[in-house]
Image: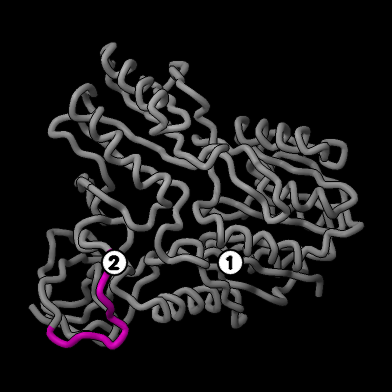
Amino acid sequence: MTGKVRDLAHDGDGIVATEEGILFVPGALPGEVVRVRPDRSRGKNRRGRLLEILEASGDRVEAACPMVDTCGGCPQMVLSLEGQRALKTRRVEEATGLVPEWIGSPDSLGYRRRARLAWQAKPPTLGYRRSHRRTLVDVGDCPVLVPALAKTLEHFRTVLRSSFLGGGELRLAVGRQGGAVGWIGTEDTQGPAVYGALGALVESGAFEGLALRVGDGAAPATWGDPVEWTVSPDGDALMGTLSGFSQSNDGSNRLLVERVMAYAQPAGATVLELYSGFGNLTVPLARRATHVRAVEADPQASSACGENLRRLDLADRVTVVCGDAAAQTHGSVDVLVLDPPRTGAADVIPQVGAVRPSRIVYVSCDPGTLRRDLAGLGAQGYRPEETTAVDMFPHTAHVESVTLLVRN
């Protein structure tokens, strides 16, 4: 069937109007006339597959990756960077009611310093899950990975072909020396050949470090130094956690951190930071503020935050608390910084009245939960004054934002 693309959904899929109703179609762009095939999905959000573009959008470009139609990693790669900007800034404007300033990614290719791939031994496959499906797509090369990670794919594939059993996941990140580190998780028992082959990868310099965990409760086997590291805008080396969260785009992250500092104005202030992670914002705040209270529920991330502060001689300026942000009691502060996961910060908003900050800086990775939480903060007497959209993930519909709120 044929239809016209009305708009893009928040996940980047084209909203196609057909004679049989609305279909959500990956790869279709606004204004295009397309031929599509409905899939077997039922209900309100029916999905379809793009078969042919009958009239193309002026924003359509040739993708930099030949696998854009099968791999689920970069669904917006067929949309021009200007078109991607329009989509992302509109989403932030809808969430905040403000026209956002735009911070583009310094690089649109070779920017991802972190990746999560799936693998299976038979047939040997290493790659990403197809969009909206569980199908594993084999990826020989990935142009959005930083070179240090991209070149490891074939090294790991060699071991996959010869030694591994079953299936699992591979998390990649950048290590302290700028090389790749990897964390491998599987539920399938592995033979001695796997352990020997992984050790050989580290000895050869293909990886700075590797960790293999078989089963959820088992202690991992490790080779080399399988620890993620990043660098703050101040030049501080920060240890992360492969099992936890960190930003995947170094260039955009540094610009985001600088914007947080500009909004927070932490010099001489007391700061409460909730969802602090391993210290991506904590360390720059500690270099400027009188005191920071950093709260993080993930024990590994909280421990890494404390270690980073001690190594940088900043521990006396920060109180690190490992625990649920909503379960803590907080005294009044000058500045509140929120950097929650995709689910947002609804659980902690009722506490804002007791904290009574003069400024709130909210870092969001989901405009939907941001909009909800801004309404909750509005009921507490705060209004958004400025906002910035940050392109952390070029060629996807994901957008990061930083919003400053002040008391009415």
Q: Quadrant of residue 190?
A: top left
- The answer to whether residue 66 is left or right of residue 365 is left
**x then y, percent, for residue 56:** 20, 85
What is the chief secondary structure element of the magenta stretch? loop
Residue for badge 2:
64
Q: Quadrant of residue 119?
A: top left
Q: Which mark is residue 265?
A: none
- The C terminus, quarter of image: bottom right
Q: Report the amino acid beneath label 1.
A: Ser
Residue for badge 1:
401
Q: Secondary structure at mark 2?
A: loop
Residue 149 higher or lower than 398, as above or below: above
Q: Residue furthest top?
A: 192
Range covered by the magenta-colored residues: 54-64
**x then y, percent, for residue 287:** 82, 50
- Check residue 61 for magenta coloring: yes
Q: Which residue is depicted at the point 38% across and 43% down? A: 116
